[in-house]
Image: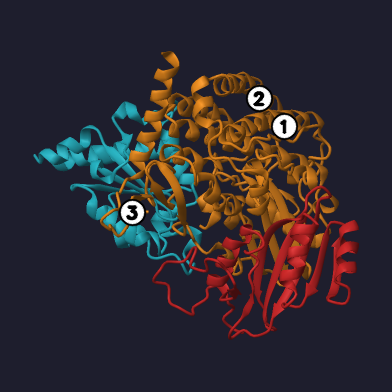
Chain colours: A red, B orange, C cyan
Amino acid sequence: MEISDKIKKRFNGRIFDWQENSNRRAYFSVKKEDIFEVAGYMFKDLGLRFSTASCTDLREGLEILYHFSNDPKGEFYSIRVMIEDKKNPQIDSLAPIFPGAEWIEREIWEMLGVKFINHPNLKRLLLADDWPQGEYPLRKKEN
Amino acid sequence: MSHKIIVPIGPYHPLQEEPEFFQLYCEGEKVVDIDIIIGYNHRGIEQLSEGKHYDQVAFLVERICGICSSSHPYAFVLAVEDLFGGEQKVVPERALYIRTIVDELQRIHSHLLWLGLAGHFIGYNTVWMWAWKYREPVLDMFEMTTGNRNSYAMFKIGGVRRDLKEEDGPILKKMLDEFVPALDLFRGAVMDDPVIQARLKGVGILTRQQAIDWCVVGPTARASGINIDVRRDEPYGVYNRVDWNVVVEKEGDIFAKTVARILEMYESVRIIRQCLDKIPKGEIDAQLRDVPVGEGIGRVEAPRGECFHYIKSDGTNRPVRHKIRAPSFMNVASNKVGAVGGSISDATITLAAVDPCYCCTERVAVINKADNQKVMNGWDLIKLSQEKTERLKKELKA
Amino acid sequence: MDLRLKALTKSIWVFHISAGSCNNCDIEILDCLTPRFDLERFGIQLVGSVRHADALLITGAMNRKSVPRMKKIYEQAPKPCVVIAVGQCALSRHMFRDSYNVCEPLDKILPVDLYIPGCPPKPEAMIDGIIKLVNKIKEVKK
């Protein structure tokens, strides 16, 4: 994986838990302060396509995975970011880099309550207008 | 800006069979901004899926969308099989072929459906009726091979549920032989018709750079010159074992999107024919049990683009997290650039050109009437669009 | 008898509402209009505005955002108006009944005159249902 070497070299020391499930799938973690820079590098400089983001409510915090696809090679890179603060989760928005992230961030915001800083248009996408504030359907009940 | 008119379309309107709500901000005839409001179809499938057994989820995701009802289960089983080490390793050969055949039949039926609706929007009801007439034999094939016209319930983790019968192959081939002349007819009708060219060429252009920025997928991206196709880039099924081409167009307008879809149907026919020739005998189910711990990603090229499923498993019989990203989620958002700058009478076809599927994406015009807002419903818009076609027809005759 | 009911049996104009469906029922409804099934031979037609409609064809699992709009549309429809529930979701919410975003089944919200079950119901089943409904209205009239 040529691109993985480039990422490792560029962000030496700021990337941890590199894990390759197969020769087509790579997962790695970054700190949430670095996500704007890393995602921007992957999208703008490496020319990867942003596929989507997925957020999971875990016991340790809210985990967001940003999925990037390297289409010519068929490889898939997932950046893992953990937000420990469940009471007031915040992370930088990627929508200023590419508008394709706008909708998915709106969805994560309403489904799991992650606030995206600098998002141009953070308002409800799917839920009804009278949906109670502070009630997030995809948060796990027992945690 | 005092002459700004807001044109609400929807949520219930004859433009699409699904509810969605567009607010077009217009100055004169020109659309200057657009607001897309969705959520009328949101059923909370991601959360429901966390409460279901893996085998049940396959049925649930089939009901995300009735048009791509093989793509979602396929992407889901791919995601689970990714945990087992990948589809190509665990699934029996015959099942791979059957999966590919069902997936391609679905592509044909979906593209024909879109073609018909697109014809309806620009005032060619004949195209609608014809396209849907030729879609019926495809649905018959589905009924014959899978048992249902729309929800196939064909996919299961580790294989397929039903085998292709011995006699199915020749009937399928016969259907394809009869289908190709109809497809030639459509190609001729679209590519040679001066009115359709005048209506669709140069309309709703999504440039290559915009397509990259909005991360669009599928025929929408391929019509803008982006050469992506999950079937080739990350082969699943038997797509790497049959001979076919990815259709890429450069212009990015609606005409290119239409042509891309029509040409793709030819490729689908080619793929199914080769699959029917090559399909081996054998098992159709690998009987996979006990989903391992980990994360799996499944990607399928649905008729509208890349369909993405992510599964996080903790070793129990239910997924911890099941993220679904349907292709229209990316494509519909790009309407924001496609429709802005065009005229209102082109808006209907532009908004429909990405082949939106709101059931996938999510899931009544209640507009506050201010003084300078004119309220039009979707019917008026289709009328506008159909009148424009009539006008062009007359001009061409004159 | 009632002239308005009599008119209803002649040629039903239908307005279609999708209240959170999966598209399956919707495309089968459109399928009814296309050459193979051709519902228009019975005078049945899909109309663009609810103000022209004699019947509301409702599909889907009633979600929170669409229910208020649906009620509003029902209020706008000229009465007498027939409500037809198409598909398992509209009848019983199907597999979406535990969802956070799905409300009550349709017959708790609006008075339903005809249920067409199936996931999705075949076009034949829909045509059969509508013919049965027309016959029933005729009986009431006598």
Q: Nearer the viewer, residue C113 or A85?
A: A85
Q: Give me the residue at 72% from left, 32% from top.
A: B272
Check if mark 2's residue and mark 1's residue have beta carbons within 8 Å. Answer: yes
CA–CA distance in space, label 1 to label 3: 57 Å
Q: SS at mark 3?
A: loop
Q: Amino acid at mark 3?
A: Ser
Residue B129, position in %: x, y?
A: 46, 27
Chain that bears disc 1: B
- Specify whether residue B291 is in view: no
Dot 1, crowdedness within 10 Å: few (<14), some or many (≥20)?
Answer: many
Q: Is residue B66 above or below residue B317?
A: above
Q: Nearer the viewer, mark 2 or mark 3?
A: 3
Residue sitting at x 45%, y 49%: B32
| Earlier residue among tags 1 and 3 | 3
Q: Chain of mark 2?
A: B
Where disc 1 sits, the SS reads: helix
Give the residue furthest to the top: B398
- Give percent across and percent down for residue A111: 55, 71
Residue closest to the far left? C1
Q: Is residue A15 left or right of residue B24?
A: right
Residue A126 % position (x, y): 49, 63
Residue type at mark 2: give it: Leu
Disc 2 target residue = B176
Position in image of residue A105 (x %, y %):
59, 66
Helix, strand or loop status at disc 2: helix
Q: Are marks 1 and 3 in contact (CB under 8 Å)?
A: no
Residue at the location (75% across, 30% down)? B276
In the foreground, C57 or A116: A116
Residue B2 image label: 3
Q: Earlier in the sequence, mark 2 or mark 1?
A: 2
- The residue that disc 1 covers is B272
